[in-house]
Amino acid sequence: MALTYNDLYLNLRKRFRAKGVFEADRAARELSCAAFGKTREELVRDGRLYAPPEAERALEELAARHLAGEPVAYLLGEWEFYGVPLDISRAVLIPRPDTEVLAARAIEAAQGFAEPRVLDLCAGSGCIGLAVAKHAPNARVLLGELDEEALKLCRQNIRRNQLTERVSTMRIDAREKPSRQLGEFDVLVCNPPYIPTADIETLDTSVRDHEPRLALDGGADGLDFYRAVCALWREALRPSGRLLFEVGIGQADTVLRLMRASGFGDVQVEKDLNDIPRVVFGTLWDEI
């Protein structure tokens, strides 16, 4: 029996809800648009039209892959973060809504300077740094990332968002002392790997089997990158510069103490959309 585009979308949404798929409605909508080759507006406009068999087959293939654990963003090859469209691949983590809390604080910090230099360390797709550049138009942003494939994606996303004049990339290891040639920054924002090594095997299959381990593994207790950045990167900040971290569940208090011990004052913790302490940020004092 022939089905309309809307029938296919609604059937998929019902299946995803029944299976407990995360963000079932959004997943069904995005996969339907991809399978049908339509924008969201076109899906609404054409919803009453009958879908050809090849569209139904394409949707079923995407649905099966997602139900097997493959994330929607990797199936689509793109995602949106804080109003910024991004190319996405398995070389990088998929930007999460909770990370938008970190992006909002980084944007606010950058807007506190006339012409801020901003470093997005452990940049991944470049989502945070690009959000800062978009919403703080006087900022110049460097996306620092260790993985070469992720850096390629950063460059794609810079071009996609027409930010080549103000955003650049550099291969940087956050666990090593920064080169003096980098100069000083007003804002350093970092969403590092923070999953304890032993916990990675317990993660949901969509994360464990598909997202890059390099971007997940934060060492034995998940805190390796926080220790390194606090110890080594304060000299890359100007006096009164701001350091902002995303942290994992249960890590906020420890990261707060690390920052205070490293010379940061007015250190604060902010909760994410699920009321979990997620962002720790503070200001570099002139003297420790």
Image (cartoon, rainbow, N blue to C red):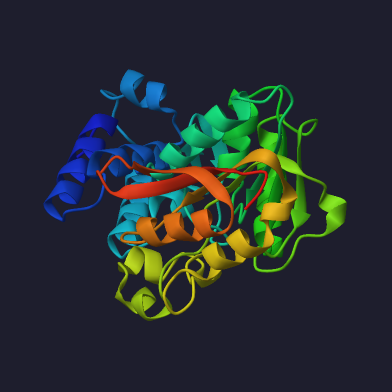
Taking the image as shown, residue 138 lies to the left or right of residue 105, namely right
Q: Report x, y in % for residue 192.
A: 53, 59
Q: Which residue: 61% across, 60% down?
A: 229
Q: Report x, y in % for residue 48.
A: 25, 23
Q: Nearer the viewer, residue 188 or 130?
A: 188
Residue 203's quadrant in the figure?
A: bottom left
Q: How many labels were placed on the picture?
A: 0
User: Which residue appears farthest toward the left when viewing the image?
Assistant: 18
Q: Nearer the viewer, residue 116 or 76?
A: 116
Give above or below for 266 relative to 69. above
User: Which residue appears farthest toward the front when viewing the image?
Assistant: 287
User: Which residue appears farthest toward the right when viewing the image?
Assistant: 181
Q: Is residue 78 visible?
A: no
Picture quarter with the N terminus: top left
User: Which residue appears farthest toward the top when viewing the image?
Assistant: 45
Q: Report x, y in % for residue 42.
A: 40, 23
Q: Which residue: 27% across, 60% down?
A: 67
Q: Is residue 264 visible?
A: yes
Q: Report x, y in % for residue 115.
A: 74, 25
Q: Nearer the viewer, residue 135 or 261?
A: 261
Residue 159's quadrant in the figure?
A: top right
Give above or below for 69 relative to 281. below
Q: Which residue: 65% across, 57% down?
A: 150
